[in-house]
Amino acid sequence: MNKFSQFLFILLALALASIISLFTYRSLSTKPNIDQSATENITQNIVVAAADIARGSIIENQHLRMTKYLQDSIPPGSFSKLDQVVGRIVKQSILASEPILESRLVSADITKGGLAALVTKKKRAMSVKVDEVIGVSGYLNAGHRVDVLVSIQRKGEKEGYISKTVLENIKVLSAGGGIEEEKDKEKKKVINVITLEVTPEEGEKLALAVTKGKIQLALRSYVDSDDALTKGMTVDELLKSYHADEQMFVETKPVILNTQEVTQTPSPPVTRKKKSVIIAVMNGAQVAYIEGGK
């Protein structure tokens, strides 16, 4: 084999290797894009609300519709079939186009709606009649949390009233209104009934507070769940509120100046005694002493 044949063989080998490398590169670079695109387009139908569904309602077919969600975006607890949701009771209000989730529904073994379906296990629903002031001026709604205060007279004390927080962080199940006729049939007043969710022991406290005293509801913040321990407020302690120091009120007698003229009697003149001087006069051997004044 001459040199020309060897050179031609090497050239063909290089060309073949280049073609194989180019084909392999294109295959590897295009395949992941196809797989990624196919994955991104995978969707699944889930059940959503066709309209707003109120709390305590029993879900019917007209409340629902199906919609497509990306598989990676499907929320946990969703449903893929309408018959899995129809007949269930709504525990929390659901807005239109929101997915129907298991956490928003009452347990599947409860088939009847109403207030009883919303009461938590081992708790009770208890209603109290309140006015606009006690009901926080009508701002109470279902889902709010309140404290219950009672003003009650102490046993054996005619004026021994005390106000005390007896229940804290109590859930409001419902807040409704109505009209009540007074003894004078021409007069009517608006009343509200607040239904609270309490334990049996809390229910006993609430019943006694309503029977023996006057209750007041205090609305809590959504983010405040801590209990506040208090000793109660008596009339004496109430009147000591913003009490100033007693020393501020000590009366000081004003100093009254005597403006009358004071007459002074002139003091008698001081008489001074003249000092006496003794003068000695010498006349030869004789000395004579003479006393004289200065």
Image (cartoon, grey):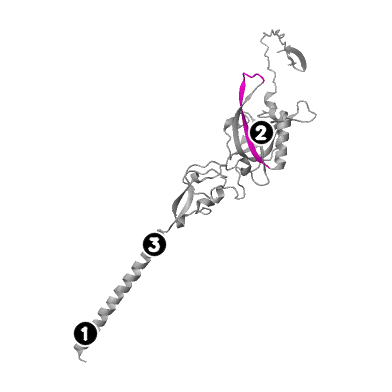
Real-space Cα separation, disc 2 to disc 1, in angstroms: 104 Å
Amino acid carrying label 1: it is Leu
Crowding near the residue tagged with mark 1, few <14, some 14–19, many ≥20 C-alpha atoms within 10 Å: few
* Residue at 66% across, 33% down: 128
Above or below: residue 150 compared with residue 86 = above
Q: Quadrant of residue 57?
A: top right
Q: Looking at this rendering, what residue extends furthest in the right direction?
A: 156
Question: Could you say which disc has been placed on residue 128 in the image?
Answer: 2
Crowding near the residue tagged with mark 2, few <14, some 14–19, many ≥20 C-alpha atoms within 10 Å: some
The first of marks 3 and 2 along the sequence is 3
* Residue at 73% across, 31% down: 211
In the image, residue 190 lies in the stretch drawn in magenta: yes
| Residue 68: x %, y % from top left | 43, 53
Front residue of 200/246: it is: 200
Pointer 2 with pointer 1, Cβ within 8 A = no
In the image, residue 10 lies in the stretch drawn in magenta: no
Residue position marked by numbered label 1 in the rendering: 8
| Residue 206: x %, y % from top left | 70, 36
Q: Main structural element of the magenta stretch: helix, strand or loop?
A: strand
* Residue at 61% across, 22% down: 188
State which region is magenta: 183-198
Front residue of 37/46: it is: 46
